[in-house]
Image (spheres, helix red, strand yellow):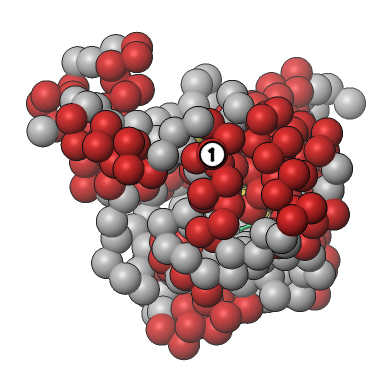
Amino acid sequence: MAKEFKNKRGPKRRAARGQLRAKGKTTPGTHVPVLLQEVLATLKPQPGEIVVDCTLGYGAHAVEFGRKIGPEGRLIGLDMDGGELAKTQRRIGIGGARKIFYHKNFSEIAEVLKAEKLEGCDIIFADLGVSSMQVDNADRGISYKSDGPLDMRMDKRLERTGADLLTTLSQDELSKALWELSDEPDHARIAEWIVNQRRVTPITQVSQLVRLVFNAKGITERTWQKQQKTSRFGSLHPAARTFQALRILVNDEMKSLITLLEVAPSCLRPGGRIGIISFQSGEDRLVKQAFNQGLQEGIYETISKDAIRPRTKEIVTNPRCSSARFRWAKISAPGTTGS
Ligand SMILES: C[S@@+](CC[C@H](N)C(=O)[O-])C[C@H]1O[C@@H](n2cnc3c(N)ncnc32)[C@H](O)[C@@H]1O
């Protein structure tokens, strides 16, 4: 299979990636780390360094960071999902490195470093979006794959659920979000259907939203399933983009990323590195712009030239990583900044 996809370019390659993504299966209750070798090879964690893993999740990246920084190193893990954080905290060992975990949004990284009495760290790493544990938990309503309440909050302290937003946002706001946060081509029609539907019944369940998207797109679930069986490459689920946009909105994910990108340079020690994996074009654009601007202003000494994408081999074993893009930047040494 790996060979089959290896030399495909353009639409065929994108379709092949889409098909693999649609299959996405991970052992329940676990998460496979994305682009692990590329992350370690570029961020180069060294013995004794301080690493902030902004998105601890299952801790799979953190464990590898821990091995590299060793007993003299220090790992600070953040996650806005208190439930998963507690499970990971109980389970992981990280090669003897000192570790501490915070139930915090990564936009608060500066406050965390202050609480740890640290002036900075050597590595900031963020693997954006949701973990497989969150996607696979039907009670969270993050995925279109199984029915449940349209909650979508990664952090239960957040006030508004997906169902709340579907009730309160205007048609224009919904349409804009669907376009800007997930490139949904049928954004206007879906927004119109949501507003018409909620006049009749509140949209509170995953299955309701899935059905509504199919209706807005003028296809039935049956027709789509049939197409999947016969088409060579398969395609993204019709509701995938709608669910992604709503989840990003519920968790205010863009705002957190913007804040992280703004404060990161002041949280890194001389020689420090930052690496971010994103899964959506809007996020990747923000990362790329911030790193480019930082390079121009002399804040960063070097940045990744292009986004690093998973190889076909990785996508075949972990289809969920197919849209991942990794970028990194290295802070300038003191006295070399343009300011
Ligand atoms: C893709 S998973 C990370 C997986 C992790 N790298 C691993 O190897 O297991 C993303 C995690 O980041 C958390 N998260 C997303 N946005 C966050 C934010 N703004 N602040 C803190 N945690 C966040 C999610 O709750 C989720 O657990």
Q: Amino acid at mark 1?
A: Asn
| Farthest right residue in view | 339
Quarter of image, res 118:
bottom right
Quadrant of image for the N terminus? top left
Would you say residue 323 is visible in this rendering? no
Would you say residue 215 is visible in this rendering? yes
Q: Is residue 155 above or below residue 42?
A: below
Residue 174 x %, y %: 76, 40
| Farthest bottom residue in view | 90
Quadrant of image for the C terminus? top right
Please name the residue shown 48% across and 83% down the image: 87
Residue 261 x %, y %: 74, 42
Left or right side of 29 for 174: right
Left or right side of 17 for 174: right
Residue 60 x %, y %: 39, 64
Please name the residue shown 32% across and 43% down the image: 222
Left or right side of 169 for 143: left
| Farthest top residue in view | 10
Q: Which residue is tagged 1? A: 215
Please name the residue shown 14% across and 32% down the image: 2
Q: Is residue 63 above or below residue 33?
A: below
Quarter of image, res 275:
top right
Query: Which of these two is toward me, 315 or 162?
Result: 162
Please name the residue shown 18% across and 30% down the image: 230
Query: Which of these two is toward me, 150 or 78?
Result: 150
Query: Which of these two is toward me, 53 or 137?
Result: 137
Ligand 1 quadrant in view: bottom right
